[in-house]
Image (cartoon, rainbow, N blue to C red):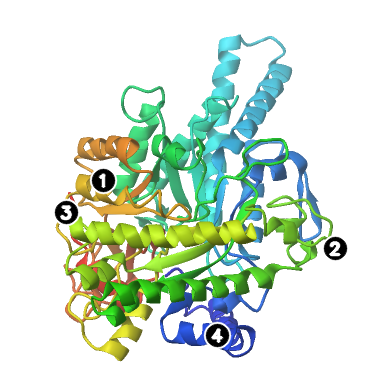
């Protein structure tokens, strides 16, 4: 949803992708896997990049790259000597990493705090040398503070503008997430608080479009961790959480992670998703320490759950038998992903394997040990729990009967991942597929094969992962509370959202929801509308008309070139419009507050 197919650089990527998909289907995959993909039994994700030995998403080890330096394009990049330089180096790393993988990446912003302190000390030294005791400490500190504010603002602006203007070899801006947590064991926690607040305030302002109007940028995605010190119950950093809430109301980001709930699922750890929603499994290094940064995901294969239920036609015996068969098929497809990376040498992507983003290997070293032992994950995705449950029980998964069946299926898939991991040591994990375009593809295939089925194929889309039907009338608190039970099972990837109206004049209500997130659900986000019509200046919600086209409700403009529309595609925001199915799904979404 963030690739602009009109631009020649993007067209080049899309053409190469079509060639890759064709060769993958005809030559690289076993015939039964290709057929299963074509028939909508499963989806072999990112076949447009399968020709090359690249992987999905990662957590960049930015601390290692800052501390020990890195190399890009054959040039040594040493430890940054200021905050501004650290921000610039970080964006260059993001671009380099994005060009050598096809999925998202995440950076923990807490590693920038040290460099804000470096700048502060540098400014203080310069001023003391310049004035040689002629100014009081109070005056020196005031001057240092002023210069530091300018440095902070410029550095954060560099990050925001670079990420939104960079074009990677994938023909799009980098899919990058900035992770914000208050780790009070970090000696630079106060500097980090300053950085987080500036990131949020600049996001509230937005970025100017070609008409010079501030609009909502799609990237970077922001993830804000709620913990005991900032969960709006009197904590030290509540004041920044209030800024985060205002930012969510206006710009949809940040999304929120409850440190309390996350620790329950991941052995006491809190860490960033890789990009949008893909989570690593805990892994302990040779020193007995948990490690998350510098790890990655090998790839995804997703199952079409509604199709299994359509064929079973209410017969549970047929359903479970078919699910077993398709799980084994998905396993074979995932092993194709794994085998494609085996034997790859570090020199194929130096920024990842040689210069710190993931590892520090020699050029001729193979990456095989990073593919096993649970160091990286590989994901079994799924889509359409709602439609599957409706077909098998006649009810939504929010009913007691529906929920019981949905949970059985979720646990069955999770157990399969655990069994495969035990048998192979490869980090299989259950992943709630974002289904940016897959929601339409699976639905279209099944409609062509099985015809119109009410509330299933007739909608034009399947529901994302375990989510409640987008049309179901359910309040925000109940939706979060219900979906929270699915997240620990889908530990390889899960996120939940609620649709909200314009809350800019009722931030107290949104703060109440944020407090609820901390106590009840691991990972959650708010969807609101953030649009602009360049023809008439309208800055309210751009609507979808009866022809499934985006239309300004004031001047009736339907020209996509002069409409700025930003919506939550899945976990990311999208701003280049969507396919037919996803557009219908967006149109059907009801408000939960």
Lower sequence index among marks 3 and 2: 2
**Rounded to the nearest whole Å, what is the CA distance between mark 4 and mark 1?**
41 Å
User: Which residue is the site of mark 4?
Assistant: 18
Q: Is residue 446 visible?
A: yes
Image x and y of residue 180, in percent: 48, 39
* Circle 4: element type: helix
Lower sequence index among marks 2 and 4: 4
The answer to whether 57 is drawn above or below residue 580 in the figure is above
Image x and y of residue 315, in percent: 26, 76
Q: Which mark is residue 194?
A: none
Q: Residues within 10 Å of mark 2 (few under 14, many from 20)?
A: few
Q: Which mark is residue 481?
A: 1
Q: Residues within 10 Å of mark 4 (few under 14, many from 20)?
A: some
Image x and y of residue 94, in percent: 61, 55
Q: Residues within 10 Å of mark 3 (few under 14, many from 20)?
A: some
- Asked if residue 376 lies left or right of residue 354, the reply is left
Q: Is residue 53 visible?
A: no
* Circle 3: element type: loop
* Circle 1: element type: helix
Lower sequence index among marks 4 and 1: 4
Q: Nearer the viewer, residue 434 or 151?
A: 434
Q: Nearer the viewer, residue 74 or 264?
A: 264
- Asked if residue 265 lies left or right of residue 534, the reply is right
In percent of the image, x 53 and y 32: which residue is there? 192
In percent of the image, x 47 and y 80: which residue is there? 6
* Circle 2: element type: loop
Front: mark 4 or 1: 1
In the image as oriented, which residue stretches furthest toward the front?
317
Q: Which mark is residue 364?
A: 2
Q: Residues within 10 Å of mark 1 (few under 14, many from 20)?
A: some
- Asked if residue 336 lies left or right of residue 445, the reply is right
């Amino acid at each position: 949803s963030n690739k602009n197919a009109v631009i020649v650089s993007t067209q080049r990527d899309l053409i190469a992708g079509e060639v890759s998909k064709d060769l993958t289907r005809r030559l690289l995959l076993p015939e039964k896997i290709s057929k299963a993909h074509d028939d909508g039994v499963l989806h072999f994700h990112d076949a447009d990049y399968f020709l090359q030995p690249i992987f999905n998403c990662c957590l960049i080890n930015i601390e290692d790259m800052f501390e020990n330096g890195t190399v890009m394009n054959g040039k040594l990049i040493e430890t940054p000597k200021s905050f501004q330089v650290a921000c610039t180096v970080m964006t260059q790393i993001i671009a380099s990493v994005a060009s050598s993988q096809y999925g998202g990446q995440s950076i923990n912003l807490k590693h920038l705090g040290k460099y804000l302190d470096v700048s502060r000390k540098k400014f203080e030294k310069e001023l003391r040398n310049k004035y040689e005791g002629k100014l009081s400490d109070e005056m020196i500190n005031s001057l240092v503070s002023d210069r530091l504010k300018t440095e902070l603002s410029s550095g954060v602006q560099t990050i925001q503008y670079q990420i939104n203007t960079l074009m990677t070899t994938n023909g799009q801006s980098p899919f990058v997430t900035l992770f914000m947590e208050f780790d009070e064991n970090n000696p630079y926690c106060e500097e980090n608080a300053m950085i987080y607040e500036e990131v949020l305030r600049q996001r509230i302002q937005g970025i100017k479009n070609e008409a010079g109007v501030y609009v909502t940028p799609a990237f970077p995605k922001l993830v804000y961790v709620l913990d005991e010190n900032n969960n709006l119950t009197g904590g030290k950093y509540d004041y920044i959480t209030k800024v985060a809430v205002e930012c969510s109301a206006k710009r949809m980001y940040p999304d929120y992670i409850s440190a309390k709930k996350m620790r329950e699922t991941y052995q006491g750890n809190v860490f960033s998703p890789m990009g949008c929603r893909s989570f690593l499994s805990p892994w302990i290094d040779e020193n007995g320490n948990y490690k998350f940064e510098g790890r990655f995901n090998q790839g995804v294969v997703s199952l079409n759950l509604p199709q299994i239920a359509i064929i079973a036609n209410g017969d549970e015996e047929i359903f479970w038998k078919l699910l077993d068969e398709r799980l084994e098929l998905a396993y074979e497809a995932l092993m194709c992903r794994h085998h494609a990376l085996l034997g790859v040498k570090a020199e194929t992507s130096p920024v990842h394997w040689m210069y710190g983003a993931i590892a520090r290997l020699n050029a001729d070293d193979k990456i095989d040990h990073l593919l096993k032992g649970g160091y990286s994950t590989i994901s079994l995705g799924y889509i359409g729990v709602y439609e599957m449950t409706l077909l098998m029980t006649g009810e939504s998964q929010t009913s007691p009967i529906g929920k019981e069946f949905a949970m059985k299926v979720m646990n069955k898939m999770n157990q399969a991942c655990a069994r495969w991991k035990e048998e192979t040591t490869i980090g299989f994990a259950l992943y709630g597929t974002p289904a940016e375009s897959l929601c339409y593809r699976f639905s279209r295939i099944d409609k062509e094969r099985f015809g119109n089925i009410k509330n299933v194929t007739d909608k034009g889309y399947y529901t994302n992962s375990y989510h409640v039907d987008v049309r179901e009338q359910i309040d925000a608190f109940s939706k979060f509370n219900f979906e929270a039970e699915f997240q620990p099972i889908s530990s390889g990837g899960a996120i939940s959202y609620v649709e909200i109206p314009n809350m800019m004049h009722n931030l107290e209500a949104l703060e109440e929801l944020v407090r609820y997130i901390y106590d009840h659900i691991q990972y959650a986000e708010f969807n609101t509308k953030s649009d602009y019509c360049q023809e008439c200046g309208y800055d309210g919600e751009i609507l979808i008309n009866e022809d499934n086209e985006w239309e300004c409700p004031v001047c009736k403009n339907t020209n996509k070139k002069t409409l700025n529309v930003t919506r939550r595609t899945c976990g990311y925001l999208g701003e280049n419009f969507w396919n037919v199915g996803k557009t219908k799904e967006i149109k059907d979404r009801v408000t939960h507050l």
